[in-house]
Amino acid sequence: MRRTLFTQDHEDFRLLVRDFLAREVVPVYEEWRRAGLVPRELFTSLGKLGIIGTAIPEEYGGGGHDDYRYNVVIQEECARACVTLGGLRTHLDVVVPYFTGLANAAQQARWFPGLASGELYTAIAMSEPGTGSDLAGIATTAVRDGDHYLLNGSKTFITGGHHADLVIVVARTSTDPENRRAGLSLLVVEKGMPGFTVGRKLEKIGLATQDTVELSFADVRVPAANLLGEEGAAFSSLGRNLAQERLAIAVGAVAQTRTAIDLTVSYVRERTVFGKPVAHFQNTKFELAAMAAESEAAQAMLDAAVTGLVAGELSAVDAAKTKLFCTEVQGRVVDRCLQLHGGYGYILEYPIARLYADARVTRIYGGTSEVMKTIISRSLGL
């Protein structure tokens, strides 16, 4: 089906991203995968080309385009090239919107030039060892002490935390027994602040190049000037960008689903069984036909959601529906694609194996499929 989501500017940007990946990433990607980390210089290289600063205002060196479709292009081209760029998706789709939406004039002057150039790379620290989706249960505390906050606590599952120069930390600045959601604030912790420790890099099933770490804070003195948004208003601030965060996961899910199908079509044409190409068998044709139909349906739903987001009309419920459907389709399709690869599908040398491992987490992070169903069911009055 013909897509109408993008303009010529987006397609020109796509060629820029595609060329960069082909030249700078694909030839060395296997080294990054084995190392379990992308080099920090990757982000400054992307910044020099203007790839990661599109949402930053022009006066700070950015592109001045508050258009999520540029982020979609980056994810689609990474999927096409069978690469992941560490925690870049989280940096662009999740963290940067907090800065662009909440930073005051002084903070913009301090941080926006670095965000545009790639000199500043970010992460957000919400999850704690005992607190996942229940953000109201956050135990990390920040106590006001003159012109600073004393920050104490720990965070886990922090994407991009190894390289991050700025980490937005969700901490409790006050307690209201009647309202657990009240009293949470966003503090920007800078690399090198005394008491701020980046812990071990967690080993995961997939997403090999994405650094996921534990963070700890022991009497970290965070300047009050690093408070992002209003004190005590973090819960509403976190909810404001939640639709885009979930949509971003769906974008990657659909793009990787399309790549899995393309890889499988090529494989079954070349692989022979009983003297015939695997593509010759009716089961192969029917399986891929069904997968193509599911993928098209997911793409249409996703494009409608992206259009809604760009227009400022995407609701939390529609974002939940999109994430639920697209990630569940990804799980089914990638599994069936691996099956058509046979034993080779289980070997990490083949991209389908990596796509399979990477796909599993999309039904968990950003809110599990069960959480998405709960949100959707509430909209039905259930």
Image: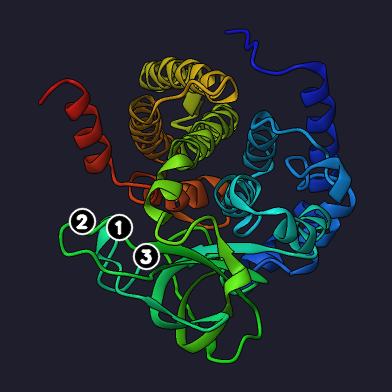
* Above or below 206: residue 14: above
Q: CA distance from mark 2 to mark 3?
A: 20 Å
Residue at coordinates 77% horizontally, 25% vertically from top-left? 10
Q: Which amino acid lies under the numbered mark 3 shown in the image of this protein?
A: Ser
Relative vertical location of residue 14 with respect to residue 126 in this rendering, above or below:
above
Which residue in the protein does label 3 denote? Answer: 127
Label 3 packing within 10 angstroms: few (<14), some (14-19), many (20+)? many
**The disc labelled 1 sits on which kind of residue?**
Ala
Check the picture and name the quadrant holding the C terminus: top left
Q: Earlier in the sequence, mark 2 or mark 3?
A: 3
Name the residue rendered at 70%, 33% in the picture: 66
Q: Is residue 209 visible?
A: no
Element marked by disc 1? loop
Write down the residue under mark 2. Answer: 179
Tell me how far mark 1 sits from mark 2, CA to CA: 6 Å
Q: Work out whether 309 lies above or below 371.
A: above
List the residue tagged with mark 1: 182
Q: Earlier in the sequence, mark 3 or mark 1?
A: 3
Residue 139 vs residue 283, the one in the foreground: 139
Quick check: marks 3 and 1 in contact, CB under 8 Å? no
Quadrant of the rendered image containing residue 117 = bottom right
> Which amino acid type corresponds to the residue marked 2 in the rendered image?
Asn
- Farthest residue in the left direction? 382
Helix or strand or loop: what does disc 2 sit on? loop
- Disc 1 and disc 2 in contact, CB within 8 angstroms: yes
Q: Indicate the position of residue 26 as horizontal and vertical percent values.
A: 76, 52
Which residue appears at 68% of the width and 62% of the height? 30
> How many neighbours does mark 2 have within 10 angstroms: few (below 14), some (14-19), or many (20 or more)?
few
* Residue 25 visible in rendering: yes
